[in-house]
Amino acid sequence: MLRRLIIPGLAGFAAIGGLLSYTAFAEGGKSSSAIVVASNELATVLAPEELEQVGERESFISAYRRLTESQYRHAIADIFGDDIKVEARFEPERREEGLQAVGNAQLSVTTSGLEQYYSLARSISRQVVSAERETDYLPCDVTSSKDAARKCADEFVQEIGGKLYRRPLTKAERTLTLTIWDASAEGKDDYTQAFEHALTSLLISPEFLFRTEVAERVDDSDAFQLDAYSKASRLAFYLWDSPPDAELLEAAARGDLNTLDGLSVQVERLLDSPRFDLGVRAFFTDMLHFESFETLTKDTMTYPKFSQAVADSAREETLRFLIQHLVDDEGDYRDIFTTKKTVLNRTLAAVYNVPYPSREEWTTYEFDEDTERSGILTQVSFAALFSHPGSSSPTLRGKHLQEIFQCTKIPDPPADVDFSKVQAIEEGTVRERLDAHRTDPTCASCHILMDPAGLALENFDSLGQFRTLENGDPIDVSADIFGQEYSGATGVGEYMKSNPQVVSCVVQKAYAYGKGRKNDYREGQFLNSKTEEFADAGYQLKDLFRSLLTDPKFYEVEVPEGLSARTDSASLTTKAPASGGN
Amino acid sequence: MKLASRLISLTLAAAGLSAPALADWSKSYVIEWYEPAHYYGADTGITYPGTDCPAGTNPEIDWEEVLVRSGYTEEEAKWLLHPEHPYRVPNHGQNQMAFRGEGRANVFMEPWTYPDPGLVGVSGEISEGFDLDGNPKTGFVSPDGVPGIDNEFYRTTGCWKYYRGPERRSYVAESWNDRMREGSWTVAIVVSGEGEDPMNDDNVTVAFYDSPEALVKDGNGDIARDYTFTVKPNAKFEALFDARTENGRIISTKAMDEVWIRDPSYTKELQLLKAQLDLSMNEDGTLTGLVGGYRPWEPVHDQLVDARGTVIESLTWIELPSLWYALKRNADYSPEGTDGEKTHISYAMRVSAVPAYVMLEDASEQVQLATSFRNAPTAEPWAPIEIAVKFSSVSVEQGIVRGEHGFIFAGPDAPIIPPDLTRDELAAQTMEKMAAGGGQ
């Protein structure tokens, strides 16, 4: 009759088959749609005929959002300490609508990815229960009587499981994990391995690897919002790129997060924490496409200063710069395109060809006022990521200026474009080589959006080094951007700073990043009002995040289109905040 | 204004204060490669004959013949060289090889107890370097025809396989520059002047400083340009040269009495007396040329002894006493005057440096005036040449390696053949003797 696939807190070796089944399912499914329902026992995947009834339930799982690598690492460090080695190659993330946070809500785990997670889970479990650490995490003597050890295992599963799942375990989840402990403890005098296997099962559970966002009915209405634990996770991963801490989970359990005051208290606490830097890092790592650093290469014959150290430093420079400017200095977001200030290390100072005035590893630095340096636009990260290995690329730079900072999607080029002319980089300047783009009407329609600003950044080569000549010819950095004349990087910086689209774009991205889905056109008015608030607050990043995260709309969940919100709700009563417990 | 600022700067510098002293222009660099300026006269390879060494390099040593010549029997010589000789120090060779002087004296410590085995020197007429003695009639002719080039160090070692080779390809240059490029030490250079045109200035100073920051390699394995280095004030390792520039060529205007520079060698210490330089500021931003003077010759020999004499002899293909005799024979300078003992030998080295930023010790400002930091409060104090070469795994005394028990198992009276005791038995016996006050 109904086909149900149980998704338990899978465990150890025995559970692999089950998780593979889960994987196979989820790869074919759309996990952001309401195809999974939560109960107090087990999460179950519904057969198609059940889907239509989702809206009639009190709660349903609205999204599975795979933990990013940094979120996984932060979770392990938070729960078990930062000396636990997390040695694995994580599966690539997926970018949708300009954000990995959106793409990750569409992601599952491949078979090889599961093997990696399993191997990693075993490695982490071994480290946690090792003789050096067991007293930190195991609430008992692993060689005590079996009854005592079993009781201890129950405590362990509840405590560590709750931290890993970011909510109290259900009775069924506890029972299942303890079943694994029992099987492993059978016939043993030392129960270390049983703890290891139980922990492994928790670590490869989808409840840990994915952020399960559960929607619950709001009072007796047709509206749904995230339950309190899902809110806690959304808040913590947004602002700290980490799982919720004990205080946030307690606030969720008390129902505080379902009141504006309680929510505000927690948002404020998270914003004021030094860990907020992690959240800012994660947001901009996503927004600025920094996963591309993994594959960044340059022709070292042309750019001998390039090395992996330069790439790593460039990524770090921009993140430190953004934290310094937007968080520490409470700067105006728009100034990231124009400021002469940055944060440097010795490696980057050599690339920028400036003296490194510090004995510390990193230092704040201000370029001379008369230089062409202009905020993030001329940092090595932007210049290098959006260039070719052997040459700069006004088109790539222009495209990403549009897509990253102005939320304007530029279509991919037609399949039959002849690139041979623009790739002949040995002669002349790229402006001449790109001439065809401006004269051919087919090309011009898109290139008019990209090339002018990109050409104005041509004083910076593929590594972000300043230059005035290309192949011996002077570089022309004048630009006509939508009828306005600009010159050089500083001109583009001024254009970006004064462009209202740049402001509304970061608001849109911040919202979609938190919700893990593409913004809906019906949210336009809401986003406009948030953009106005952002402007009124002096374009302060913290204010933007606070404004979004304390707004009930941020936690609203739409019942998927085509599914009825409810049929007969007469018997439904207002729910208390989901406890997640048994 | 310029004069005033310079006076203030010089006053502060003389007082040892690290003020941001100014010059009218300055350029700064970091040495990326330097090596003995040994003119190479062959077409290719290390050992092939050339105009410098018509017979090629010094021949391989027949160590059995050396031992027999030193008074060991043929049987003893064979046994001492046998890889299974139980008293050899694993990986560090046969200590007994040191005892081949008269009365089985240690030839590393007393090379004069051993007849000169001979080290064939350069017989060619061309050499890089400087006319240090001011006499154009003595010495070599430079590659571009200037007579009077004094480079007796080249004459001594130029046909030794350890030193011979095309530019940047000799064993000694590659091995020591590799260590520098991997971060063992760094030498920064500041050139400053007082004129309007850096390329043609009559008052130029060139300074060589120690720096604590390691060199950084670029994507091609070369030393990266434009990195920042701070000056580490040092009462010893600092070299200042008075010079002028002509079309970008920096030429000494006087021989500096005494300078110290890090040497690409075991001791990393190079004293130069009557030092001169001839460097070019190239269009590509690099600085290349020569630095020379008279260097003390004995440390050249002694550091190799201390770096495990028997091992060095094996690795560098000569008998070390031959080097000692040759250096002594060719030494051409005495600080005490013409009648004094010739303690120094004329020398030149090629220097190649890339553009770099050189900062004051606290990294607050660039060094814009080539000046002395010797008297800075933080300066490393003066210390005599430290010959002792430190190895992480063994200790070396008198050119001889101590084994795992701390014993040498070699000496004038050491058992040679047949070894009637195993290594462990000999160690136990030695310990007993020591306990009884007999020494080893």
Image (cartoon, coloured by chain):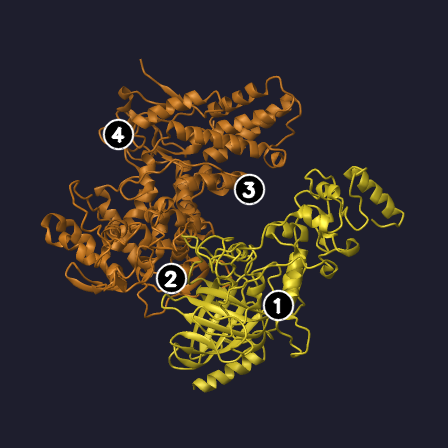
Kindly identify the amino acid type of the residue bearing the numbered disc 1.
Asn
Q: Residue at x 56, y 65 (%)?
A: B155
Residue A398 image point, x, y percent: 23, 53
- As measured in the structure, the alpha-carbon distance from the residue carrying label 4 to the one carrying label 1 is 102 Å
* SS category of the residue bearing label 3: loop
Distance from the alpha carbon under mark 2 to that under mark 4? 58 Å
Which residue type does callout 4 highlight? Ala
Instruction: Classify mark 4: residues with Cα within 10 Å, few (<14), some (14-19) or many (20+).
Output: many
- Figure check: A15 above or below B299: above
Q: Colour of chain A?
A: orange
Q: Chain drawn yellow, letter?
A: B
| Residue at image mark 4 | A565
Label 1: which secondary element: helix
Disc 1 target residue: B330
Q: In the image, residue A383 lies at what x, y percent?
A: 31, 55
Q: Which disc number belongs to residue A83?
A: 3
Disc 3 to disc 2, C-alpha distance:
35 Å
Which comes sooner in the sequence, label 3 or label 2?
A: 3
Amino acid type for the residue under numbered disc 3: Asp
Looking at this view, name the residue that lies furthest to the right.
B436
Mark closer to the observer (4, 1): 1
Task: Check the image and report above or below for B49 versus B13.
Answer: above
